[in-house]
Amino acid sequence: MSQQVDPSHIMQVGMGFWASKTLLSAVELELFTKLGSDGMTGPQIAEALELHARAIPDFPDALVALELLDREGEGNDALYRNTNATAAFLDKTSPAYIGGILEMSNARLYRFWGDLTEALQNGKPQNEIKHTGRPVFDELYSDPDRLEQFMNAMAGISLGPFNALADKFDFSGYKTLCDVGGATGQLSIIVAGHHPHMRCTSFDLPVVEPIARRTIEAAGLSERVSAVGGDFFADPLPKADVITMGLILHDWNLERKMQLIRAAYAALPEGGAFIVVENLIDDARRENAFGLLMSLNMLIEFGDAFDFTGADFAGWCKEVGFRDVERLPLAGPASAGIAYK
Ligand SMILES: C[S@@+](CC[C@H](N)C(=O)[O-])C[C@H]1O[C@@H](n2cnc3c(N)ncnc32)[C@H](O)[C@@H]1O
């Protein structure tokens, strides 16, 4: 019996931070962007990234073994290249770049997760607010570089799920959408881009509004997409046929979650749709490891905030008065929870 038990899964998960940090450093050093569509030898990589000679060939070869680089040939003359996936998603010049979330993980979360045990013991945040107790977004946004980094992280993690929502949800019966906590305006831009009949508003804190306005202008969609500044706990939400919230409810405790769901209900007409885009945990809480780990990440970032299942979301929405609630799988671990008024 004991011969059939294999420790490789334990080792892979337990030492997973080796692989994780190797990728995060490669993103930080812009390896995938510098490679672009070219091949580079190990010494050329060392020169381009200003690495010590000791880093070669271990660093690029480890990435080859992790299937994050391709390599042709052997030894000093071997050529390293982007894989199809790293070229699409980790080269900054690609429109599908999602490395922002990895940049922020490298700069912030990697270190904060070192204090996970403490968080499990005391239920308190372990990020920048660990010693100040300031509200998270006040702290994050007090530094313009960190604000920009957080915005890019959100754009990275949400690109796939937002594109999937724009493809899969039937927008034909609606004319207006307000994306609450819309950050760079990404969801509004994607929905307006896919559905020329839709007019969208991206609602977020006033400090974020100029960033959204810039992105909307760059996308050439200022006629149909607007950015509005406000506080979703203090101000009524702009009225719209569809109210969306991407990765918003998971940032808050249950009382605040319910306040936001009630605010969405109030901003919708009869027949309107409230859509959350989250890494909804499966109802049995066994399978969506990313969603469950995201919830631990909310412990690290906020303390009392948490991710939730589709059934949790349906229960909360019914309590507020929504008629029907459904779940729409999007990309990877992300799903939409959709509640109809
Ligand atoms: C986790 S991010 C999600 C961004 C984006 N919706 C997405 O899914 O990629 C949370 C967003 O909520 C915004 N936010 C936080 N507190 C807010 C408040 N009181 N009023 C309005 N927006 C707020 C933040 O500025 C941030 O853009």
Image: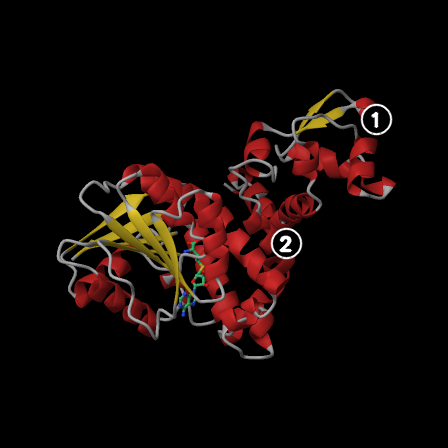
Q: Is residue 224 left or right of residue 271?
A: right
**For the residue marked with disc 1, what is the amino acid?**
Asn
237 in relation to 285, above or below: below
The answer to which of marks 2 and 1 sits earlier in the sequence is 1
Asked which secondary structure carries label 2, the reply is: helix
Is residue 59 something one can see in this rendering? yes
105 in relation to 171, above or below: below
Q: Is residue 192 left or right of residue 301?
A: left
Q: Quadrant of residue 183?
A: bottom left
Residue wearing tag 2 = 106
Is residue 157 something one can see in this rendering? no
Q: How far is mark 2 from mark 1, CA to CA? A: 29 Å
**Residue furthest toward the front?**
223
Residue wearing tag 1 = 76
Q: Are marks 2 and 1 in contact (CB under 8 Å)?
A: no
| Residue 26: % across, % down | 68, 43
106 in relation to 22, above or below: below
